Image (cartoon, grey):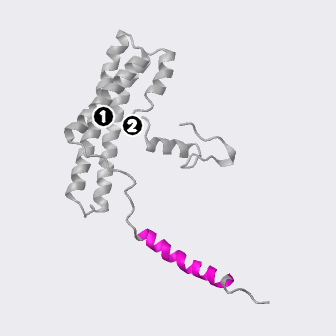
């Protein structure tokens, strides 16, 4: 019995055509999947950030239903929120300027480590100032307000950072992805 030639030739031709077709498909210019966001001016970025901060402060005040005495104690906390926001804006601007100046050159590792240490020191100082301002305010809150404050304030930068989450997960024996050893439940976020 004779085997038809097409039984061997067709698969061989297909096997040869697939890599060529794949190479041609990759060579075709792909349509841009994501559109770039328009660049905002420094003034627009500042207005946007200021609006976010003002909205956040108003949300905290409204959600906690602060009385007059609590509002007076909240004033230093509000100031620390504004200081922290201004520091983030300044750091963002400085990073953008450094990236623009050093298009193709990367600073040496020692310089990058010094900058990181400086940022951490400044952030720790801001966090300490926030904690100092926050303690008297927190003590003035009712138990229900404290519970709400824990929810409303947890999303603030500095109170909910990747470093804190990483440290807490590893402190409790959880891995970096929230996995737990021995079937324990991962830490809630």
- Give the secondary structure at mark 2: loop
Label 1 crowding class (10 Å Cα cut-off): few <14, some 14-19, many 20+? some
- Give the secondary structure at mark 1: helix
9 part of magenta stretch: yes
Residue at image point 42% right, 34% down: 159
Q: Is residue 66 above or below residue 13?
A: above
Locate residue 87, reporting x and y percent.
27, 38
41 part of magenta stretch: no
The residue beneath circle 2 is 158
Give the left or right position of residue 100, taking residue 119 as reference: left
The main secondary structure of the magenta stretch is helix
Locate residue 82, reporting x and y percent.
28, 29
Disc 1 to disc 2: CB gap under 8 Å:
yes
Q: Which residues are magenta?
A: 7-26
Locate residue 18, reporting x and y percent.
54, 75
> Residue 28 or 158: which is nearer the viewer?
28
> Residue 129 or 179: which is nearer the viewer?
179
Tally the marks. Answer: 2
Q: Is residue 77 above or below residue 173?
A: above
Label 2 crowding class (10 Å Cα cut-off): few <14, some 14-19, many 20+? some
Rendered image quadrant of residue 45: top left
The residue beneath circle 1 is 84
* C-alpha distance separating marks 1 and 2: 9 Å
């Amino acid at each position: 019995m004779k085997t038809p030639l097409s039984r061997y030739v067709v698969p061989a031709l297909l096997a040869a055509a697939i890599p060529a077709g794949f190479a041609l498909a990759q060579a075709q210019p792909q349509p841009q999947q994501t559109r770039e966001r328009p660049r905002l001016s420094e003034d627009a970025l500042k207005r946007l950030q200021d609006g976010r901060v003002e909205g956040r402060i108003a949300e905290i005040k409204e959600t906690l239903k602060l009385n007059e005495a609590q509002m007076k104690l909240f004033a230093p906390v509000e100031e620390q929120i504004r200081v922290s926001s201004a520091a983030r804006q300044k750091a963002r601007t400085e990073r953008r300027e450094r990236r623009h100046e050093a298009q193709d050159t990367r600073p040496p590792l020692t310089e990058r480590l010094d900058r990181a240490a400086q940022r951490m020191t400044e952030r720790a100082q801001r966090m300490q100032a926030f904690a100092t301002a926050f303690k008297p305010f927190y003590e003035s809150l009712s138990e229900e307000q404290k519970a709400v404050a824990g929810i409303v304030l947890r999303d603030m930068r500095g109170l909910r950072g990747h470093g804190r989450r990483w440290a807490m997960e590893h402190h409790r024996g959880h891995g970096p992805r929230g996995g737990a050893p021995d079937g324990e439940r991962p830490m809630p976020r």
